Image (spheres, rainbow, N blue to C red):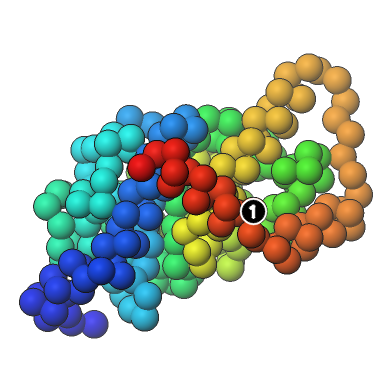
Amino acid sequence: MNHDSKVTEALFHSEPIHALRADLALALRAAAAHGLGEGVCNHFSVALPGDSDLFLLNPRGLMWHEVQAEDIVLIDAQGNKLAGRHAVEPTAMFIHAAIHRIAGKACVLHTHMPHATALTLTSDRALDTTLSQNAMRFHGRLAIDRDYNGLALDVSEGERIAHAMQGADIVFLANHGVVVCGERLDYAYDDLFYLERACQAQVLAQSTGRPLAPVNPELAGKVAAQVQSERLQSALFFEALRRQLS
């Protein structure tokens, strides 16, 4: 889809999109505060309401804790920057553009957060969703991309990752990291935070050397449905972060 530059610029600076930029920047600062960042790498993106061909993304070269609404950039489904004062990192364009376009996800959060990434280095490649209560909320919502293929420096690699998701909300990328998706930024960030907590608990439990004690998959599925049926806690968490980090 072609976008008129003047119309796109006006949209980028409109009040609703500025609010979305502020929320995206808040999510990045929260992730930094929670130890989920990695230097100036990794990216969060949000599709513009009503136009899945356009999405907001954090810029290249800024630490997550310093990102503000004014730093967020706008790019299209082909990875072209349309508005914003900063450059865009190439792997972000290829991974995020493909997931928005192919998987149809509104929010795409990609991190190398430590405990989730640690599990991608194991033979299982991912979280066991029958262990902790935090893990159970993700039962039936995970995919695993078992084929690490180097840095995502071309369109085909981004598309390969997007197809590997198979409609799941979360994908564990072998030897790499994770991608967490959602329809709302507050819900997606809440999932990201609790995914890392669940992975941390599993890594700690495994480090004891004692046998693990999973629940049956039916119970894990029940817990997942309970969490998904009422997400007020996710919205309240994001609002608490807004008060804390604004």
Judge left or right: residue 148 versus residue 138: left
Residue located 91% across and 49% down the image: 216
Residue 79 horizontal side relative to residue 118, left or right: left
Q: Position of residue 242 (x, y in %)?
A: 43, 46
Quadrant holding the N terminus = bottom left
* Above or below: residue 46 compared with residue 133: below
181 lies left or right of 197: left
Are there few (<14), some (14-19), or many (20+) residues within 10 Å of tag 1?
few
Residue at x-position 80% and y-position 40%: 131
Image coords of residue 46 (percent x, y): 38, 62
Q: Residue furthest top?
A: 208
Q: Where is residue 130 in the image (x, y as percent from the top left)?
A: 81, 45
Counting the numbered discs, the total is: 1
For the point 50% across and 51% down, the residue is 239
Residue located beneath label 1 in the image: 233
Where is residue 57, by image quadrant? Answer: bottom left
SS at mark 1? helix
Question: Is residue 43 among what the camera can see?
Answer: no
The quadrant in which the C terminus is found is: top left
Q: Which amino acid does label 1 sit on?
A: Gln
In this view, which residue lies farthest toward the front? 243
Q: Please say whether residue 134 is visible from this viewpoint.
A: yes
**Residue 159 at x, y = what percent?**
41, 63
Q: Tell which of 245 and 134 is nearer to you.
A: 245
Q: Quadrant of residue 83?
A: bottom left
Whether 48 is drawn above or below 25: the answer is below
Report whether 61 appears left or right of 50.
Answer: left
